């Protein structure tokens, strides 16, 4: 691409600018424009920049960078005055309405009648109040508020028992303040947000509520929350037949995870009962000891109620199951069918397919352009693959086979595969 030097008679906002021009061959040539920097006309800056940008092709944006749509209200003519139905009677006070509806979740806030169940202000007009308390939103709000008060009462009762046993720092604080702090920590844990980020939320959380402690003080509530969660799970599985799923990993450090499954009202429920960080990989005897400790000691599972254990087919898991069967005779050992079927496929004698799928996976792993072109043509993203053991080559093979079976014209050009 050649660059040509030209001199413009009119002034330019840019002392030196690259301006693209279309050549006779259809390609874009770049012309170097120069002007006197002492004589700059800023009025032409915007139009010249727009002309400059229009010569080049804009990049394709990802779906993640899409412009957010704002939900807008329907445009209606502006009222000159408030509708009569929204004005409060001058002869009635909020405290008077509060006495007339003692069974509703009303309170007086800043001189206004406020519904704590719906978290909104309510007009003092009798017809509006009657319609409000009949609304589904208000009924559900009262139910949720009742459940909230019940949960807070349970936490307060459990705190008294926990204080008698451990005497933690801050036990003399008001119970309502401690309950609020525990609810905040539980919300962080449930959402998967690290407590290290607490300072970013402190101002909002403390607005109109209780003061939070420092980060260390919030961490100190976790043992109490753990005890409460264990007691809740123990109550849920009491007297029910269960199965156990256990597995270990060394990906981010040695760890053991144990999950309990049970059926409640014809729905399968599962609960995580242990995540144990370890120094090294466990032996079969150590796995058996941990499982027995969890089931028999922590959750008091009767020997006849453990029906099955699901695990991968590592040799240590086989040793663990042999030991567990002495205490739980009804247990069935179920190896991982997914791993087994994947290993069966590895023994197929398909050298051409093996080499093709190896190159295919490498192509999609290293070429964003290929991934975009494939999704644009087929409407589906190609399944990815990793060498970690819970990935299978069947995922990209199966997806590719299904797409080709549906559309035998699927084809990518050489330029799209670069």
Image: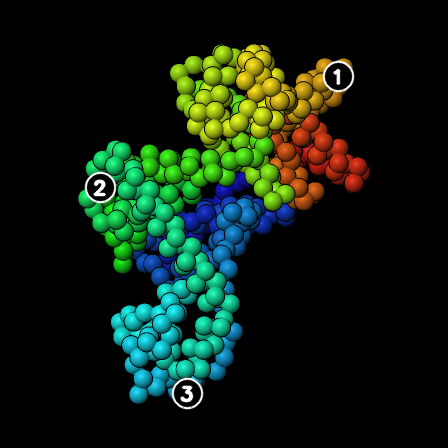
Determine the residue positioned at 48% across, 24% down.
296
Tell me where residue 404 appears, x and y as whole percent. 77, 36
Tell me where residue 412 appears, x and y as whole percent. 71, 37
Q: Relative to the observer, which residue lies in front, 308 or 138?
A: 308
Determine the residue positioned at 61% across, 26% down.
307
* Separation of residues labelled 2 and 3 (CA atoms): 53 Å
| Element at label 3 | helix
Q: Which residue is mark 2?
A: 171
In this view, the mark in front (1 or 3):
3
Determine the residue positioned at 19% across, 44% down.
172
Tell me if residue 157 can be seen: yes
Determine the residue positioned at 44% across, 39% down.
232
The tag on residue 275 is none
Q: Which residue is mark 3?
A: 84
Rendered view: 115 above or below 168: below
* Separation of residues labelled 1 and 3 (CA atoms): 80 Å
Bin the neighbour count of mark 2 within 10 Å (Cα to Cα): few under 14, some 14-19, many 20 and up.
some
Quarter of the rendering containing residue 358: top right
Q: Relative to the observer, which residue lies in front, 13 or 354?
A: 354
In this view, the mark in front (2 or 3):
2
* Horizontal side, residue 105 vs residue 397: left or right: left
Question: Which label's residue is closer to the chain start, 2 or 3?
Answer: 3
The tag on residue 348 is 1
* Separation of residues labelled 1 and 2 (CA atoms): 65 Å
Rendered view: 63 above or below 312: below
Tell me where residue 310 appears, x and y as whole percent. 60, 24
* Horizontal side, residue 333 vs residue 292: left or right: right
Rendered view: 158 above or below 128: above
Bin the neighbour count of mark 3 within 10 Å (Cα to Cα): few under 14, some 14-19, many 20 and up.
few
Quarter of the rendering containing residue 229: top left
């Amino acid at each position: 691409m050649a660059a040509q030097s030209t001199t413009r008679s009119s002034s330019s906002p840019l002392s030196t600018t690259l301006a693209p021009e279309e050549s006779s061959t259809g390609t874009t040539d770049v012309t170097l424009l120069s002007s006197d920097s002492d004589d700059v006309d800023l009025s032409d800056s915007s139009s010249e920049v727009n002309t400059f940008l229009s010569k080049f092709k804009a990049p394709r944006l990802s779906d993640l960078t899409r412009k957010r749509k704002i939900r807008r209200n329907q445009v209606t003519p502006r009222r000159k005055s408030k509708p009569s139905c929204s004005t409060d009677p001058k002869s009635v006070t909020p405290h008077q309405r509060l006495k007339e509806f003692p069974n509703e979740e009303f309170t007086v806030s800043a001189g206004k009648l406020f519904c704590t169940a719906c978290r909104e202000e309510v007009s003092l007009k009798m017809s509006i109040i009657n319609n409000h308390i009949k609304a589904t939103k208000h009924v559900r709000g009262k139910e949720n508020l009742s459940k909230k008060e019940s949960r807070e009462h349970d936490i307060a009762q459990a705190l008294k028992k926990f204080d008698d046993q451990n005497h933690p720092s801050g036990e003399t604080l008001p119970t309502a303040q401690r309950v609020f702090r525990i609810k905040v920590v539980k919300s962080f844990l449930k959402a998967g947000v690290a407590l290290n980020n607490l300072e970013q939320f402190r101002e909002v959380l403390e607005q109109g509520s209780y003061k939070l402690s420092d980060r260390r003080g919030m961490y100190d509530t976790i043992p109490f929350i753990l005890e409460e969660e264990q007691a809740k799970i123990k109550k849920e599985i009491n007297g029910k037949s269960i199965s156990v799923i256990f597995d270990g990993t060394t990906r981010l450090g040695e760890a053991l995870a144990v999950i309990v499954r049970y059926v409640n009202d014809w729905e399968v429920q599962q609960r995580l009962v242990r995540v144990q960080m370890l120094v090294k990989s466990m032996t079969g005897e150590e796995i058996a000891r941990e499982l027995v400790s969890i089931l028999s000691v922590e959750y008091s599972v009767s020997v006849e109620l453990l029906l099955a254990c699901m695990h991968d087919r590592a040799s240590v898991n086989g040793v663990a199951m042999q030991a567990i069967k002495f205490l739980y005779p009804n247990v069935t050992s179920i190896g991982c069918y997914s791993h087994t079927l994947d290993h069966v496929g590895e023994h197929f004698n398909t050298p051409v397919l093996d080499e093709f799928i190896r190159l295919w996976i490498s192509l999609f792993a290293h070429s964003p352009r290929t991934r975009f072109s494939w999704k644009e043509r087929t409407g589906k993203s190609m399944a990815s693959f990793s060498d970690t053991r819970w990935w299978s080559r069947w995922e990209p093979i199966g997806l590719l086979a299904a797409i080709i079976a549906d559309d035998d014209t699927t084809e990518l050009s050489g330029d799209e595969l670069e």
